[in-house]
Amino acid sequence: MIPEIDRFLRHLEDERQLSPHTIEAYRGDLHDLAAFLTEYRGSPDWMWTDVDRLALRSFLGECLRRGLAKRTIARKLSSVRGLFRFLHLEGVIQVNPATSVRSPRRDRPLPDHVARQGIDRLFSLAETRADRNTLEDSRLLLMLELLYGSGLRLAELHGLDLEECQFDGERVKVRGKGRKERIVPVTGAALRAWRRYEPRRRETGAQSGSGPLLVNADGVRISRRSIQRGVGEILKSAGEGEGLSVHSLRHSFATHLLDGGADLMAVKELLGHASLSTTGIYTHTSKERLKQVYRKAHPRS
């Protein structure tokens, strides 16, 4: 690893406390950049002061030629900008060439979500299964209630510890992207799901009052893959599995709030978005539904 990239990654881990998954994404992006610069300069002996705006634009062009999605290219550019901002602050370079490099215009597809009728079918099935009173079934119902009822991300749900959950107070504390903390409300249904799950959790030998919220039969935190597999399976069983995932429940949470008249700024805070423009994509979903209703209902449409 190039020393400056290694120092930057340590800075992300130690000072900004980004997640291991995010740091690995940075590592891959910057490895790609370094490999490209070696080929672009025709020698492995290049220096950061040799890299100009044209070189970075050529890197993005190479990403396009490789057929990478615009979203992926935009993420790589974000990683590059972060590195060069760090190099500039460290005094390695005097001028930051990344500031004037524009990100490719990204397509903004409407997020996949579960329709209201589909949500009813999904929870009806989950509650029927939870009546079997097993660890797996009661845990799955609680996961669904937090994903859809509180709009949690997969990583936020996976990382929840029991001491951060105040179900009786109808709120939980989650750590979002960049380890930013926020308090989110939970539904009465989530409280009922917790009361079903809590005795099964105790039977695993997991710590009472602390430790991971979601545990396996050995009393240790379940994997993200287990969450994805469980949610994906029940979405499919409920007839809602085509193209849907754990994240689709978060999309459904936001879409249904906005459809119900919720304020966009309030939804932004609930989702933990840094920018209102990120939340704005859900307004497109609602507008699209309005257009469909209009086309079906209006005689001149």
Image: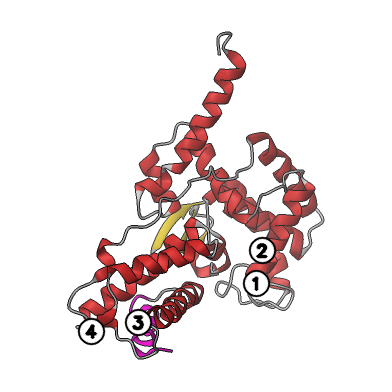
Report the number of numbered marks: 4
Of the residues shown, which amino acid type is indicated by label 3?
A: Phe
In front of the other: 76 or 195: 76
Question: Whole-Å distance between the Cαs marked 3 and 4?
Answer: 12 Å
Of the residues shown, which amino acid type is indicated by label 1?
A: Ser
In front of the other: 110 or 276: 110
Question: Whole-Å distance between the Cαs marked 3 and 2?
Answer: 32 Å
Residue 92 position within the rendered picture, expressed as x and y whole percent measured from the top left: 23, 84
Label 4 secondary element? loop
Residue 248 position within the rendered picture, expressed as x and y whole percent measured from the top left: 60, 49
Q: Upstream in the sequence, badge 3 or badge 4?
A: 3
Q: Quadrant of the C terminus?
A: top right
Mark 2 = which residue?
Answer: 227
Mark 4 = which residue?
Answer: 92
- Whether residue 271 is visible here, answered yes or no, is yes
The reply to whether discs 2 and 4 touch (Cβ–Cβ < 8 Å) is no
- Whether residue 176 is visible here, answered yes or no, is no
Give the magenta part as a residue range: 1-16
Magenta span contains residue 212: no
